[in-house]
Amino acid sequence: MVGVGTALALQSRGWSVALVDRGGPGSETSYGNAGIIEAEAAEPFAMPRDLSSLLAIAAGRRNDVIWDLPGLFRQAPALWRYYSASAPALHRVTGSHYAPLTRRSTADHAPLIEASGAEQLIRRTGFYVVVRSDAELAALASHAERLRQDYGVGSQILDGSALRRQEPVSEKASGAILWTDAWSCTDPGALTRAYADLFVKRGGTLVKADAVSLRRGTRGWTLGDLEAEHVVVCLGPWSPEFLRRFADVSLPMIFKRGYHRVMHAATAPSRPMLDSVNGIMMAPMQDGLRLLTGADLGGRAATDPRQLERGEIVARELVDIGQRSAAPVWAGRRPCMADMLPVVSEVPGHSGLWLNTGHGHQGFTLGPTTGALLADAMAGGEPLPQALKLSRLRGHRWRTAP
């Protein structure tokens, strides 16, 4: 979604654009997510800092985060930065930069949804966070009120009875918050492909190739037969490897692997539903009810079934999710910057090399938004916010091009 959103934004400002994708738009993380355009997400996901939560994660008693030693050691510097940036005062500052992005996200998606003919994929009905105790509901209501006061985020608080009048949930649910500003999509891969089709319809070029073949040419950049004055890197979790090889740029990125499995639910919720305590999202899609997990920080190459197995058990306590479909388990990585803000920036010392990456959990939400910011800056319009530039990262490095 980030690459397609950027290509459309540049195209709308008069650039001739080629969109390069090795597998085709909508085939990677843009396919496997929960399909939510999270306009309510005024603050990014912070790392827990209280001792009880950290001990529970360390002991494997929480399902929203799992880990192993190789993954922990490999990501330790970035995880320490993440922990530091999650301090309440710093997190509030981050929210002041983050909220202006997410709060405009539905407005940036809306014209693309209409122009691409994808209205049938979109629900403008929000999503739920479900809780299992009155104490959790009270805490969630307090959080929602703070977001309303600080950022204007809309929500509705429902007790268990009110929730059961709207959705097929069990008595285990004590209530929920409905984030009313969010939109959701019944097939995020199809929406991304619809945007890509719109890009081609408007005169763009779609090229199936691997970005590793990019080279600096005499008049800019080359990739196979393509030549361009500017290149925008929108490679998500593959960005750090590409930039280390190509420009000696170091990005402190955390890789949070997520999984989904499709269930055949006889009666699914009408909109996505998050059981945040147990780290499982239930998202109704065209092909069934998608169960999605939280963060796997492990370093193993193979998928780890623990979160989905546990998540399926707790999801059944709330909703009759039915039987597993024959579709295989999907796995993908979220590209999370340690300071929780995406990098939207030109690379110092590398004229014409730009970044739009590191969106964490919100690439599907923010693709058109950060694409528009970058396109404006590249066209000589509004400068990019300093908070999103590469130069904000203390301890980063880059090698000046010869």
Image (cartoon, grey):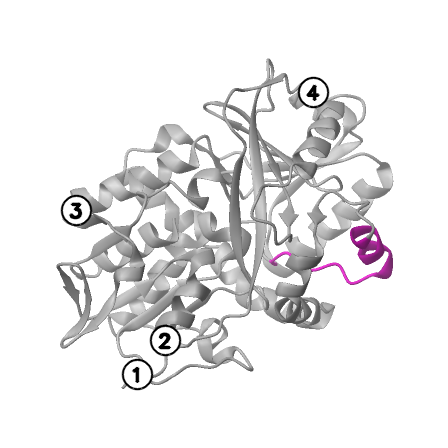
Residue at the outermost top position: 266
Q: Is residue 263 above or below residue 49?
A: above
Stretch in magenta: 43-58
**Cβ atoms under marks 1 and 2 closer than 8 Å:** yes
Q: Is residue 359 above or below residue 247?
A: above
Residue holding disc 2: 247
**Cβ atoms under marks 3 and 1 closer than 8 Å:** no
Number of other residues with Cα within 10 Å of mark 2, as a class: few under 14, some 14 to 19, many 20 or more:
some
**Which of the two labelled residues, at mark 1 and mark 2, occupies the earlier sequence position?**
2
**Which of the two labelled residues, at mark 4 and mark 3, occupies the earlier sequence position?**
4
Residue holding disc 3: 202
Work out how far the residue at label 4 is from the one at label 1, CA to CA, in angstroms: 62 Å
**Which of the two labelled residues, at mark 3 and mark 1, occupies the earlier sequence position?**
3
**Cβ atoms under marks 4 and 3 closer than 8 Å:** no
Numbered badge on residue 401 = 1
Residue 366: give x, y in percent of width and height: 44, 54
SS class, disc 3: loop
Describe residue 12's horizontal placement relative to residue 251 as left or right. Answer: left
**From the viewer's perspective, is the residue at label 4 or at label 1 nearer?**
1
Residue 175: give x, y in percent of width and height: 76, 32
